[in-house]
Image: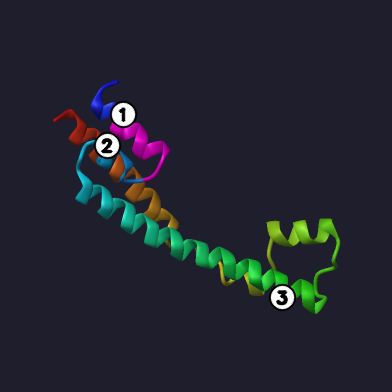
Amino acid sequence: MKANLKAALLTAIIYPGAGHFSLKKHLIGAIFAGVFSVLLILTMKDIFAVAQCTANEIVAGKIPMTFTSIFGAAKEPSQACAKLAEYKYLPLMIVIWVLSMVDAFRLGKK
């Protein structure tokens, strides 16, 4: 398999920066992976905040302890919990992932 295609696929399927590591471009790969990881952690923090808010509502009795009620609350959180979920880093994560794929493909051609 060609190096450029292999690097782009590794980045697309595994993680941003993975293709750079296969091309021996460790610094660039670490930068892409590091920035993406920080944004992923911040996004996971938002997800956990919504889950904790929903769990607090279940314990407080605002949501009945039935499977369908809990599933419905997970799909559509209450107004108070939905305010915690901004997911403002998601578009930037997608941009970094795409840039990493394009850069891996470009470096693999050299």
The figure's colour scheme reads rainbow
Q: Quadrant of residue 23?
A: top left
Point out the image quarter for the C terminus: top left
**Lateral position of residue 19 relative to residue 78, left or right:** left
Give the image location of residue 105, x and y in percent.
25, 33
Residue 82 seen in the figure: no
Task: Classify mark 3: residues with Cα within 10 Å, few (<14), some (14-19) or many (20+).
Answer: some
Amino acid type of the residue that numbered disc 1 sits on in the rendered structure: Lys
Q: Is residue 14 magenta?
A: yes
**Lateral position of residue 20 relative to residue 60, left or right:** left
Q: Which residues are magenta?
A: 6-15
In front here: 107 or 88? 107
Give the image location of residue 50, x and y in percent.
61, 68
Residue holding disc 3: 56
Amino acid type of the residue that numbered disc 3 sits on in the rendered structure: Asn
Name the residue located 32 percent from the left edge and 42 percent from the top edge: 18
Give the image location of residue 17, x and y in percent.
30, 45
Disc 1 vs disc 2: which is toward the camera?
A: 2
Disc sitting over residue 103 in the figure: none
Q: Is residue 60 above or below residue 98?
A: below
Residue holding disc 1: 6
Residue holding disc 2: 22
Name the residue located 36 percent from the left edge and 35 percent from the top edge: 10
